[in-house]
Amino acid sequence: MNGEGFRYDLIQPVVQIAIMDHTLFPEHRRFLTKYQLRDDEGFVYSDKLEFIVMDLTAMDEANQNEEDQGLLEWAEAFNANDWNTVDRISNDGVQEAVKTMSMIMSTPSERQKI
């Protein structure tokens, strides 16, 4: 710091993502919701802090944009009961995550075969 103080405008955004198997607010049931901190009058505390909640029980509420972004495929992966179900998902990001998880969950001798 060179006497100018801290440059808050250079802070990178912080995003917290919660993937839930229940509806957080039943009166506001949505597949994907973004929240910000605001005061009583609606003034946003900071645009650098955001909370995203994906409700896996509200996949039927997804809009076309969320579907186009592949978010339903991610939700299907999180809801899957077995690896075969996940393997059938054609989303490249999901498949990359599956490879990474397989590596993490494998034993050292299994990793050497990959």
Image: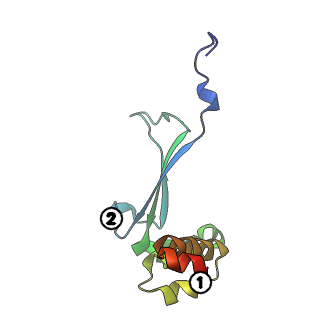
Evaluate whether residue 1 shows in this view. Answer: yes
| SS state under label 1 | loop
Q: Residue furthest top?
A: 3
Evaluate whether residue 72 shows in this view. Answer: no
The amino acid sitting under disc 2 is Pro
Q: Position of residue 108 (x, y in %)?
A: 50, 73
Seen in the picture, residue 10 relative to 105 is either above or below; the reply is: above
Q: Position of residue 54 (x, y in %)?
A: 46, 64
- Front in this rendered view, residue 83 or 106: 106
**Alpha-carbon distance for marks 2 and 1?**
29 Å
* Location of the N terminus (image quadrant): top right
Is the Cβ of the residue at disc 2 closer than 8 Å to that at disc 1?
Answer: no
**Rendered image quadrant of residue 58:** bottom left
- Front in this rendered view, residue 24 or 29: 24
The amino acid sitting under disc 1 is Ile
Q: Position of residue 88 (x, y in %)?
A: 58, 88
Query: Which color scheme does this rendered protein use?
Result: rainbow
Q: Residues within 10 Å of mark 1 (few under 14, many from 20)?
A: some
- The residue located at (34%, 60%) in the rendering is 25
- Front in this rendered view, residue 28 or 51: 51
Residue denoted by label 1 = 89
Dot 2 or dot 1: first in sequence order is: 2
Q: Residues within 10 Å of mark 2 (few under 14, many from 20)?
A: few
Q: Which mark is residue 26?
A: 2
- The residue located at (44%, 37%) in the rendering is 38
